[in-house]
Image (tube, rainbow, N blue to C red):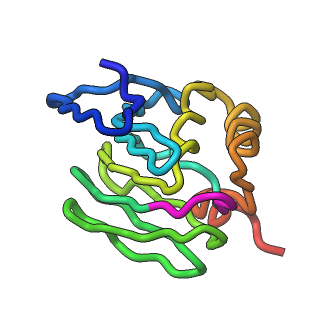
Amino acid sequence: MAVQAQTGSAYVLGPGGGTEMSWFEDVVTLKASTSAVGVFEAAIRPGAEPPLHVHNREDEWLYVLDGQATVHAGGDSQTALAGAFAFLPRGVPHTFTVESPIARLLFVNAPGGFERMFERGPTTPEEAVAALAEYGVEVVGPHPREAAASPQD
C-alpha cells in the first residue's frame, strides 16, 4: 500500500505494513508521508545509529516500541525503555544509542518530508551524511559512542 496520505482519505496499515527502506543494513518502514507529517518505524541495532545531528526544518518525536535506547539531546542523555517518548525540537543536536540487541523506534516528524531521506538507502557514513544534508539535517559531531572511544587530548 502506498503511504502518501491524501487529504480526506483514510487508510489502515496492518502490522508490518508500509514501505520498507533502509539505513545501512537496518530496516526503516515508512508509515505515512505528507507535507504536514512523516511517520516511520526503524528497527536499529547498536552501531547503526545516526551521528549527532540537528534538524533545521522539522521537529521530531521518538517513541520506543521495543528494546532500550539512550536518547542524547541538547547535551543531556536519558535512558528510554519500551514505552518511552521523546521530543526533539528542530535546532537541538540529538541522536540515540541502542542499548539492547535491537530497538524498534517510531519516529514522527513535522513538517513532513525528512522521512523520504531513507529512500536513498545509505550504506556508508559518507552516503548517510550526504542524504541527511539533502534533507536539511546537519551532522554536528560523531555518535557519542565514537566520541567516547576517541583518544582525549
Residue shown at the point (76%, 37%) measured from the top left: 130
The foreground one among 32 and 68 is 32
Q: Which residue lies furthest to the right in this view?
A: 153
Q: Is residue 151 visible to the viewer in this orientation of the structure?
A: yes
The foreground one among 142 and 56 is 56
How many marks the image carries: the answer is: 0
Tell me: residue 37, above or below residue 89.
above
Q: In this view, does 70 lie to the left or right of 15?
A: right
Q: Residue furthest top?
A: 1
The foreground one among 61 and 33 is 33
Measuring from the top left, give residue 58's x and y in whole percent: 58, 59
In terms of image quadrants, where is residue 13? top left
Measuring from the top left, give residue 70's x and y in whole percent: 40, 66
Residue shown at the point (66%, 71%) measured from the top left: 91
Residue 79 lies within the magenta run: no
The foreground one among 49 and 10 is 10
Residue shown at the point (56%, 26%) measured from the top left: 119
Q: Where, quadrant-wise, is the C terminus in this rendering?
A: bottom right
Tell me which segment is drawn in magenta: 54-60
Residue shown at the point (42%, 70%) measured from the top left: 87
Q: Is residue 53 visible to the viewer in this orientation of the structure?
A: no
Residue 57 lies within the magenta run: yes
In terms of image quadrants, where is residue 138? bottom right
Measuring from the top left, give residue 147's x and y in whole percent: 67, 63
Measuring from the top left, give residue 127's x and y in whole percent: 72, 31
Tell me: residue 39, above or below residue 1.
below
Q: Where, quadrant-wise, is the N terminus in this rendering?
A: top left
Q: Is residue 107 left or right of residue 146?
A: left
In terms of image quadrants, where is residue 139? bottom right
